[in-house]
Amino acid sequence: MTLGKFKVNPWTMNGAKKGAALLLSDRYPSFEEIKDVDRKLTEMRRLYYYRHDLFSIQWWFLLVLLIVPWIIWWKVVDKSRLKDILLYGFAITIVIVLLDDIGSELGLWSYPHQVFRLIPRLSPIDYSVLPVIHMLIYQYFRSWKSFFVANVILALGAAFIAEPFFVWIDIYDMDHWKSIYSFPLYIAKACFVKWSLEFMLSRANRSQQKPAN
């Protein structure tokens, strides 16, 4: 594996053939060998970021996506429900980041461009675009029926319009993934977080209303 003149050998061995032989053998890599590969990958990512990523058109586009949604959100958010909406936003962000990390670790998708080198996930989407959209849906569509319909529309737009667009502009690679797989996940995570939040809040309210012994 190479990047310019920078070379990485699988598990500190010389050449791809030895790496493949190790994979087919009964020997497993040690933790020290794994750390050594991690260090080499970190250096490769650093070189790639400064050579191909930083200040590219995609980098500027992602930077805008990181900042602008929060400016819009602050102008339109219902300040009287700020605590409730932020709680939902915090919870949905945790789920989004968790799913992104799992998918990236499994090699289902990857991101050729990043805003921040030390954060491997697509930060503008995970921490800005999706949380803001989900919070606005949570704010404006309070009944379960309208909330579900709004999230179906979001899922259609995100899976079949936004994701292919991000692939086209070389920000998102579907390595072993398809947009049709994303569609139910957008809906499921939003409904799960809303249900969990409402369940916990209702239990907390009932506990507070119980008379003290």
Image (tube, rainbow, N blue to C red):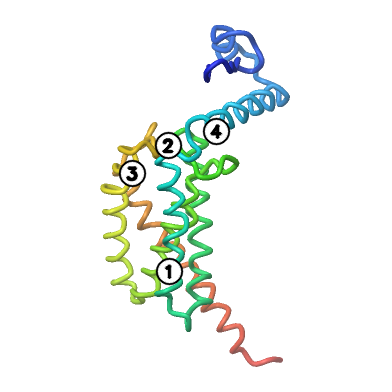
Secondary structure of the residue carrying tag 4 is: helix
Question: Could you tell which of marks 4 and 3 lies nearer the N-terminus?
Answer: 4
- Residue 129 versus residue 52 in the image, above or below: below
Q: In the displayed structure, does residue 213 sit left or right of residue 83?
A: right
The residues tagged by marks 2 and 3 sit, at their Cα atoms, a distance apart of: 12 Å
Q: In the displayed structure, does residue 160 sit left or right of residue 114?
A: left
Amino acid tagged 4 = Tyr
* Residue placed under numbered mark 2 in the picture: 109
Circle nearer the viewer, 1 or 4: 4
Q: Residue at x 38, y 63 (%)?
A: 133
Q: Which sits in the foreground, 202 or 45?
A: 45
- The mark found on residue 181 in the picture is 3
- Residue 117 versus residue 134 in the image, above or below: above
Local crowd at mark 1 within 10 Å, few (<14), some, or many (≥20)?
Answer: some
The residues tagged by marks 2 and 1 sit, at their Cα atoms, a distance apart of: 28 Å
The tally of labels here is 4
* Residue placed under numbered mark 1 in the picture: 73
Find the residue positioned furthest to the front: 55
Looking at the rendered image, the quarter that the C terminus falls into is bottom right
Secondary structure of the residue carrying tag 1 is: helix
* Residue placed under numbered mark 4 in the picture: 50
Q: Which sits in the foreground, 206 or 119?
A: 119
Question: Could you tell which of marks 3 and 1 lies nearer the N-terminus?
Answer: 1
Question: Could you tell which of marks 4 and 2 lies nearer the N-terminus?
Answer: 4
Q: Residue at x 48, y 40 (%)?
A: 55
In x, y percent, where is residue 22? 60, 12
Question: Could you tell which of marks 1 and 4 lies nearer the N-terminus?
Answer: 4
The residues tagged by marks 4 and 3 sit, at their Cα atoms, a distance apart of: 33 Å
